[in-house]
Image (cartoon, rainbow, N blue to C red):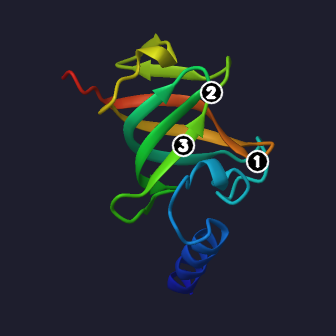
Amino acid sequence: MRRASIVLSVILLTAACGGTGSDILGGLGGILGSPSVDQPSDVVGTVTNIDTSAQRIDLNVNTVNNLRQSTGTNGSIYYDSNTVVEYQNNRYNVSDLERGDQISVRGANSNGRYIAQTITVTRNVRS
């Protein structure tokens, strides 16, 4: 039964994203199992770009809600003034993130966008 549930989840994620894998997180605001800000979801990946004017972080995505993504799956998460960035129990600004940082994101849907609530740097690219 669990396997059927996982397969169905993967099929729904693929169908909802158009099957291309592009912009997976920007389009996952409503399908990450996170229909509202009351039900957060988790994303783990490596930062590929930060666009501070669009308040967007592009990632090479490793997992979504503990489900491994296919190699080369890219996506975008968004942040706002309430987003907290943590590294080694210290707080930082989103602009302190760098390409290559590995991050774990806890966020939720907000008007169809996946908005980060907490971003934890799990491996700093400079370490």
Mark 2 highlights which residue? 54
Q: What's the residue at 62%, 65% (across, down)?
A: 17
Query: Tag 2: residue type?
Result: Ala
Query: Tag 1: residue type?
Result: Gly
> Label 2 neighbourhood size at 10 Å, few (<14), some (14-19), many (20+)?
few
Counting residues from the start of the chain, the first of labels 1 and 3 encountered is 3
Up/down of 83 relative to 105, above or below: above
Q: CA distance from mark 3 to mark 2?
A: 11 Å
Query: Tag 3: residue type?
Result: Ser
- The answer to whether 38 appears left or right of 95 in the picture is right
Mark 1 highlights which residue? 112
Counting residues from the start of the chain, the first of labels 1 and 2 encountered is 2
Q: Which mark is residue 76?
A: 3
| Label 3–label 2 contact, CB within 8 A | no
Counting residues from the start of the chain, the first of labels 3 and 2 encountered is 2
Up/down of 60 relative to 94, above or below: below
Helix, strand or loop status at disc 3 = strand
Q: CA distance from mark 1 to mark 2?
A: 15 Å
| Residue 50 place in picture, x, y as percent | 47, 27
- The answer to whether 24 appears left or right of 59 in the picture is right
| Label 1–label 3 contact, CB within 8 A | no
Q: CA distance from mark 1 to mark 3?
A: 13 Å
| Residue 88 place in picture, x, y as percent | 34, 19
Q: What's the residue at 38%, 20% (across, down)?
A: 87
Helix, strand or loop status at disc 2 = loop
Q: What's the residue at 51%, 33% (across, down)?
A: 57
Pair 3/2: label in front: 2
Helix, strand or loop status at disc 1 = loop
- The answer to whether 44 appears left or right of 81 in the picture is left
| Residue 51 place in picture, x, y as percent | 52, 26
